Image: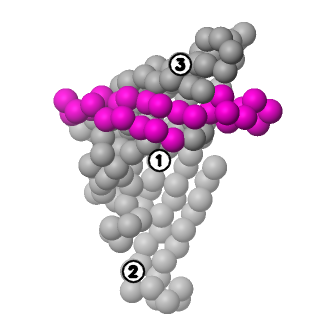
Amino acid sequence: ELVVYRDDKYTGSSFNYTRIALDVAKYFSYRENILALNLYSIYSDSDLPFFQMGNLGGMKKMRGFYEGRYRDNNLLVFQAEYRRHLFWQLGFTIFGDIGQVAKRYDQFNDKNWRYTYGGGLRLMIDKKQKVNLRIDVGVGDKKVLPYFTIAEAF
């Protein structure tokens, strides 16, 4: 998914920026095993309003950080998740994420990566649509955070 958003005086805004968000996921399956990969990026050409900034954390990106723990104009996140059906309607997952934020896109570097990892259980509540109740535990910055929600992170 690619979303381009422009705000300037012609749209009635007091801000002047372009925000481009890219969200790409790829799934590899073999029998009861799924490897899910996700790349998520936000590019901005100038300072963004606080509510438009990219942020690490929450139940979808970088589980293990509080949502917005790291926030800035530009963002880059890679996520990998192994999903496995166990029996009946139960399954589990293990995941690892790496990401960073920066004021400008050219400021991403090898030193500012943040890492999270964790695992979770799945209870399929709609077999036809393959919708799961998700219980995850994410670890990041020496904190352990639980997540209870419906549907996969990506």
Label number found at residue 92: 3
Q: How far apart are labels 2 and 3 at the CA level?
A: 44 Å
Q: What element does badge 1 sit on?
A: strand
Residue 7 percent across, percent down from the top left? 48, 77
Tell me the quarter of the image containing the C terminus: top right
Q: Residue at x 65, y 11 (%)?
A: 87
Kindly indicate the quadrant of the structure image that contains residue 29.
top right
Give the residue drawn at x 27%, y 31%.
144
The residue that disc 1 covers is 41
Residue 76 lies left or right of residue 114; in this view the side is right
Badge number at residue 15: 2
Res 106 visible: no
Q: Nearer the viewer, residue 133 or 101?
A: 133
Of 120 and 81, nearer the camera is: 120
Magenta extent: 124-149
Q: Nearer the viewer, mark 3 or mark 1?
A: 3
Residue 114: quadrant of the picture: top left
Seen as rendered, the residue at the extreme right is: 128
* Chief secondary structure of the magenta portion: strand
Q: Which residue: 47% across, 68% down?
A: 18
Instruction: Describe the colour scheme in one phrase.
Output: one colour
Decide if residue 141 is in sight here. yes
Percent x, y of residue 83: 57, 20
First in sequence: mark 2 vs mark 3 = 2
SS of the residue at dot 3? strand
